[in-house]
Amino acid sequence: MIALIYISIVIATVVAMEFVAWFAHKYLMHGILWSWHEDHHKPHYDKEGFWEKNDLFFLVFAIPSATCYIVGLNSPYVFLLFVGIGISIYGLIYFLIHDVYIHRRFKWFRQLDNKYSRAILRAHGTHHAVTTKDDCESFGLLAVDAKYYLSRKEMKAGEQDTSK
């Protein structure tokens, strides 16, 4: 029974992290921390070197995870260990989807071809179509708006219908 509780904490934390990441992306990265995130919105050919200032956010999210591991292992609050594990799992998912799959910073696997992966690519592409701090949309990673499941042709047709 206790193992089921800990597994539930890990799963709930992974799910919650999508919303934490969405909030941080919309209000911090495109807000007061834009100076760290701005280089991520520059075209690939415009960048110098492999690293971006945006990569500092890895540390921002690693600190609460590491803190949860330390406190959970060294106090009566063992559940925090499983919160830390959930944050780490989300971080791994984020890295694999965002840096490896979407931005191809590491060429570890080929493009996936299913409705969900195409929706993620469309949503993220729409986000990166804007290179400034303001007027972006689609701040999440795993949870994407239903409109991104449509083909580009269907999306354009829908945009034309709503402008009448």
Image (cartoon, rainbow, N blue to C red):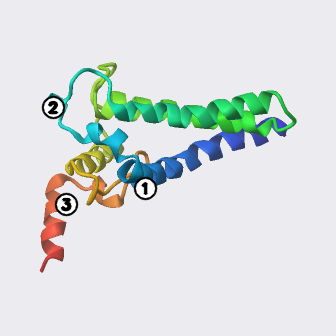
Picture residue at 30% right of the left edge, 24% below the top? 105
- Mark 1 touching mark 2, by CB under 8 A? no
Nearest to the observer: residue 94 or residue 74: 74
Quarter of the picture containing the N terminus is top right
Amino acid at pointer 2: Asp
Crowding around mark 3 (Cα neighbors within 10 Å: few <14, some 14 to 19, many 20+) is: some
Q: Which residue is mark 2?
A: 46
User: Left or right: where does residue 107 sit relative to residue 152?
Assistant: right
Quarter of the picture containing the C terminus is bottom left
| 14 vs 164: above or below | above
Q: Specify which label sits upstream in the sequence, 2 or 3.
A: 2
Where, by quadrant of the figure, is residue 38 drawn? top left
Where, by quadrant of the figure, is residue 40 drawn? top left
User: Mark 2: which secondary structure?
Assistant: helix
Picture residue at 71% right of the left edge, 35% below the top? 82
Nearest to the observer: residue 64 or residue 103: 64
Q: Specify which label sits upstream in the sequence, 1 or 3.
A: 1
User: Mark 1: which secondary structure?
Assistant: helix
Q: Is residue 39 in sight in this rendering? A: yes
Amino acid at pointer 1: Tyr
| 10 vs 100: above or below | below
Q: Which residue, as the protein is rendered here, is positioned at the far bottom? A: 164
Where, by quadrant of the figure, is residue 49 drawn? top left
Q: Which mark is residue 155?
A: 3
Picture residue at 18% right of the left edge, 67% below the top? 158
Q: Which residue is mark 1?
A: 27
Amino acid at pointer 3: Met
- In the rendering, at what x and y percent does residue 142 appear? 43, 46
Kindly report the distance in space between the C-alpha atoms of the residues bearing marks 1 and 2.
25 Å
